[in-house]
Image (cartoon, grey):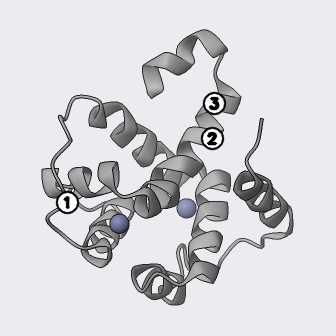
Amino acid sequence: MLSEREEQIEADLSTQVAPALHIPDAVRMGVIASSEEHELWLQGHLMGCEGCRAPLIALLLKRTAISVGRPPEIPCAKTRNVMFRYLEGGPDPDDATFVHISSCDLCDDLFFEPAQAVVLKEYEPEHVGEID
Ligand SMILES: [Zn+2]
Ligand SMILES: [Zn+2]
């Protein structure tokens, strides 16, 4: 069962052209500034790009080990900047970044939902519980 947003992402994917630069600076800046147009582009990209998805899935698995439930201490913009650095081969996001994404639906939808949607499609149902 796909949400409307996931259907939209899938529709975008089929028309998406591979970027010359991996994630264009305009998208990066747009996402950090919470521009919806750029957020949709990034979600579509993360669903279609194995290279970006692999590190996100690794994070998803790790995230289950971190206890959340405290309010985020850093803003969306800072979190997103850390995540972009990570996707480009930078260091693992710190706890503050994890806490933010875990408690912020916007950032969760942006980075983890696309990766998770692909995982759910690729894996047998009995393995799904290990991911979430
Ligand atoms: Zn990518
Ligand atoms: Zn956020």
**Looking at the image, residue 103 lies above or below residue 57:** below
Task: Spot the residue most to the top.
Answer: 126
Expressed as whole percent of the image width and height from the top left, the position of residue 105 reads 43, 57
| Mark 1 CB near ligand 2 (8 Å cut) | yes
| Residue at 46% over, 81% down | 34
Nearer mark to the viewer, of 2 and 1: 1
Query: Pointer 1: what residue?
Result: 72
Nearer mark to the viewer, of 3 and 1: 1
Mark 2 or mark 1, earlier in chain: 1
Task: Determine if residue 58 is in view.
Answer: yes
Expressed as whole percent of the image width and height from the top left, the position of residue 48 reads 68, 54
| Residue at 59% over, 33% down | 119
* Marks 3 and 2 in Cβ contact (< 8 Å): yes
Task: Determine if residue 92 is in view.
Answer: no
Disc number for residue 120:
3
Real-space Cα separation, disc 3 to disc 1, in angstroms: 27 Å
| Mark 2 CB near ligand 1 (8 Å cut) | no
Real-space Cα separation, disc 3 to disc 2, in angstroms: 5 Å
Query: Pointer 2: what residue?
Result: 117
